[in-house]
Image (cartoon, rainbow, N blue to C red):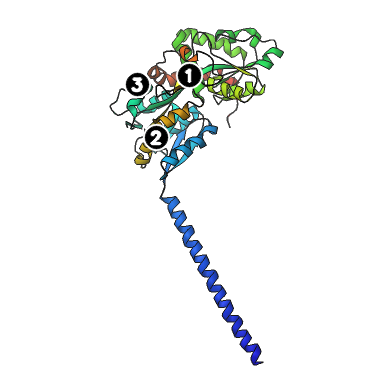
């Protein structure tokens, strides 16, 4: 009986020591976890609104945060028209700290409404002056790279359907292409808007509307993404997509039977650009992203997919980009496009929206 009692006490003692060890280990773990969480929380969370293609965002985030480990980018991504509408709707209560990779024409609309904060990033003097705001001493927007309108043609499908290779915009109004062409809706897509506004700048508004009336007869559907028409052409869903050169080159590089055509009369373009949102509570972090975005490293990353970037001497030829497309870029009046944007979009919607894909 005595032996049993002694053993019982020994067991209790051992249990107490065991519980103490477990508790101590748990406490240390909890403290370590809390410290780690505290370190993570110490990072500045930077809310960045963007229209950059989703597959590129992880690379940009990793490169920036490697150089700026105290900042954590939180992307809010959608197509140009939707991000633009979101920002305008949030004008009185901004949620974004910085806008990054959005059309310059959209940023000009916001600038006209006093939504942007001027800032001259470190290294701005190394950029081409045509690529950023020079009207203000502290630029309200800075361009990163140009995306350029083009026609994506699925050569396999075109051959099967006896469709000739188009070489001009006007070719797309020929009856042979009826039901075979897709295009972005300019109300939701920056690519769609640069198409419409560039046609007007090239030909004048009356001829441009007449052209779009003819084009509409051949349109199968208007998409809400600028890259989707090219993706649809790449997959063979439709033979021809009005889109931009980067996506056509990318798809061909991956093996899709896509030829990217730069129409001979000229091609529209816009600048992926960034701007700091006025009133941001994370100004220092936003300025760090702005500074990084004009570096040679950033411009070399832009050039991995796009042939025209803001820093002279950086751009190398991009595989399967249409030859000479940079020379075909029109003299784009961003201010005119921004000032007339709402009027143009309203008229376009009235005339053609019946063929738009459902949203969502």
State the mark number for residue 292. 2
Residue 356 in view (yes/no): no
Name of the residue lying farthest toward the left? 137
Residue 193, image x, y percentages: 49, 20
Among numbered discs 2 and 1, the one appearing first in the sequence: 1
Q: Foreground residue, 1 or 219?
A: 1
Left or right, residue 259 beside residue 191:
right
Q: Nearer the viewer, mark 2 or mark 1?
A: 2
**Measured Cα–Cα span from mark 3 to mark 1:** 21 Å
Front position among marks 3 and 1: 3
For the C terminus, the quadrant is top right
User: Relative to residue 110, is residue 161 drawn left or right?
Assistant: right
Secondary structure of the residue carrying numbered label 1: helix
- Helix, strand or loop status at disc 3: helix
Residue 105 on image: x %, y %: 42, 23
Q: Which badge, 3 or 2, comes first in the chain's sequence?
A: 3
Residue 248 in which image quadrant: top right
Residue 123 % position (x, y) = 34, 30
Question: Mark 3 and 2 residues: CB-CB less than 8 Å, in contact?
Answer: no
Res. 261 image quadrant: top right
On the question of residue 141 being in view, the answer is yes
* Residue under numbered circle 1: 194
The residue that mark 3 highlights is: 129
Around disc 3, counting alpha carbons within 10 Å, would you say few (fewer than 14), some (14 to 19), or many (20 or more)?
some
Q: Quadrant of the N terminus?
A: bottom right
The image shows residue 294, relative to residue 199, as above or below, that is: below
Q: Residue at x 38, y 34 (%)?
A: 290
* Whole-number angstrom distance, CA of label 3 to CA of label 2: 18 Å
Position in image of residue 120 (x %, y %) = 32, 31
Q: Secondary structure at mark 2?
A: helix
Mark 3 or 1, nearer chain start = 3
């Amino acid at each position: 009986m005595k032996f049993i009692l002694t053993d019982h006490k020994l067991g209790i003692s051992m249990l107490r020591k065991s519980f103490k060890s477990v508790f101590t280990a748990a406490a240390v773990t909890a403290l370590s976890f809390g410290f780690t969480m505290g370190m993570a929380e110490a990072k500045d969370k930077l809310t960045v609104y963007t229209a950059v293609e989703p597959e590129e965002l992880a690379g940009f985030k990793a490169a920036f945060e490697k150089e700026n480990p105290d900042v954590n980018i939180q992307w809010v991504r959608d197509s140009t028209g939707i991000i633009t509408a979101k920002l305008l709707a949030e004008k009185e209560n901004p949620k974004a700290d910085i806008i990054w990779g959005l059309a310059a024409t959209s940023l000009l609309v916001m600038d006209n409404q006093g939504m942007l904060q001027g800032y001259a990033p470190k290294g701005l003097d190394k950029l081409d002056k045509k690529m950023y705001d020079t009207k203000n001493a502290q630029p309200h927007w800075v361009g990163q790279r140009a995306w350029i309108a083009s026609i994506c043609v699925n050569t396999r499908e075109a051959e099967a359907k006896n469709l000739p290779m188009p070489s001009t915009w006007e070719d797309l109004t020929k009856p042979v292409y009826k039901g075979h062409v897709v295009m972005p809706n300019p109300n939701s897509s920056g690519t769609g808007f640069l198409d419409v506004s560039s046609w007007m700048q090239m030909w004048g508004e009356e001829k441009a509307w007449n052209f779009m009336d003819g084009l509409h007869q051949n349109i199968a559907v208007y998409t809400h993404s600028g890259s989707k028409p090219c993706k649809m052409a790449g997959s063979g869903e439709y033979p021809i997509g009005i889109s931009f050169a980067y996506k056509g080159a990318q798809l061909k590089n991956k093996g899709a039977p896509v030829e990217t055509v730069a129409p001979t009369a000229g091609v529209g373009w816009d600048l992926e650009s960034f701007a700091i949102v006025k009133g941001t509570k994370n100004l220092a972090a936003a300025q760090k992203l702005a500074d990084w975005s004009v570096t040679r490293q950033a411009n070399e990353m832009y050039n991995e997919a796009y042939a025209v970037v803001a820093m002279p001497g950086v751009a190398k030829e991009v595989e399967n980009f249409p030859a000479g497309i940079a020379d075909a870029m029109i003299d784009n009046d961003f201010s005119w496009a921004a000032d007339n944007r709402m009027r143009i979009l309203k008229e376009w919607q009235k005339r053609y929206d019946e063929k738009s894909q459902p949203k969502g």
